[in-house]
Image (cartoon, grey):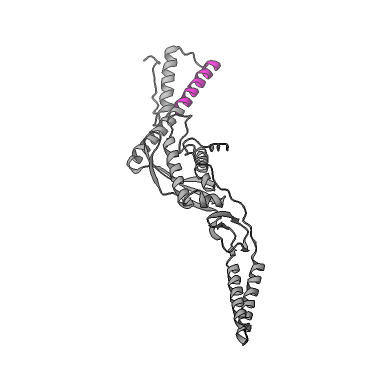
Amino acid sequence: MSAATPPAVTTAGAPEMPAPRVREFAAHSIKGGLALLLGLLGLLAAVALVAGGASLTGGGKAALIVAGVLVGIAALLAMAGLNMVAPGEARVVQLFGRYRGTIREDGLRWVNPLTSREKISTRVRNHETAVLKVNDAYGNPIELAAVVVWKVQDTAQASFEVDNYLEFVSTQTEAAVRHIAIEYPYDAHDEGGLSLRGNAEEITEKLAVELHARVEAAGVRIIESRFTHLAYAPEIASAMLQRQQAGAVVAARREIVDGAVGMVEAALARIAEQDIVELDEERKAAMVSNLMVVLCGDRAPQPVLNTGTLYQ
């Protein structure tokens, strides 16, 4: 009894892909130059046999012509096994529906002429998604798009594990981008949370991991993935802009108040240290109030001269 196949390692949120049934291996092939030379010699021999048979008048005429025709057919059939493989391409070889290997060596190669050879590009490609409109983790509608750089790593899996590996990569890329978008907010309300806008590098790494888990079954390797567009949807963009501006104002005010409190503390400590003037609690409170108004106000202060005492 055969052992059960262990389940594939998956990322949270990514579908569990079945284990691949076939892996790429090198097809048996020879250099095509020698095969081309032998094929041409076979054609010349066939022409010579047919010509020699046509010039005879005896009983061997038909035999020579038939032999020449058979040699010519064999030479043409053998030359049908020649393949031109360009750099950045591969040929997936099948014999009567069975996978017989992949040709990755560039140049002229020869394989069994009875096999079929499917061309697959192994060059680096990029796929850019359309601008997708989804809801983030807080339910806010956002727009985002991503670009993915990828290449075919296992030609056998790309040919036999999925129906169309180009459409598969496109669909899974869109699914991964949508899943990442609904898992995280556009802007995090708490300081420790991840957000799409504030933690672009971390989110990009998570997108790459999920994409790898989704397209690995198709023999595809993800080289890089990046978000190319990220914004609130037009219907809430104005409201969210006001919220961001309000948050910036609150943060700026907080910094101003913190700085003002420090300056007031330093001023009181300096006055007490140098014994410039003796301040009771009421005078300290008045001084603190005046300094806070001056330091935290939006407008320039207007001095008021007091010709009496502090209590008048």
User: In the figure, residue 174 lies in which quadrant?
Assistant: top left
The image shows residue 271, relative to residue 95, as above or below, that is: above
Q: Which residue is most to the left?
A: 235
Which residue is at the front of the view, 30 or 284?
A: 30
Q: Which residue is most to the top?
A: 280
Q: Which residue is most to the front?
A: 59
> Residue 176 placed where, x, y %?
46, 42
Q: Residue at x 36, y 37 (%)?
A: 140
In the picture, the quarter occupied by the N terminus is: top right
Q: Residue at x 42, y 30 (%)?
A: 189
Which residue is at the front of the view, 39 or 87?
A: 39
As for residue 306 lying within the magenta part, the answer is: no
> Residue 54 placed where, x, y %?
60, 85
The image shows residue 258, relative to residue 2, as above or below, that is: above
The image shows residue 77, relative to residue 99, as above or below, that is: below
In the picture, the quarter occupied by the C terminus is: top left
Query: Is any part of residue 200 visible from this angle?
Result: no
User: In the figure, residue 238 lies in which quadrant?
Assistant: top left
Q: Residue at x 38, y 41 (%)?
A: 134
Q: Residue at x 47, y 22 (%)?
A: 261
What secondary structure predominates along the stretch shown in magenta?
helix
Which residue is at the front of the view, 133 or 84?
A: 84
> Residue 230 placed where, x, y %?
43, 43
Which residue is at the front of the view, 112 or 298?
A: 112
Magenta stretch? 256-275
Query: Is any part of residue 268 visible from this angle?
Result: yes
> Residue 9 placed where, x, y %?
54, 37
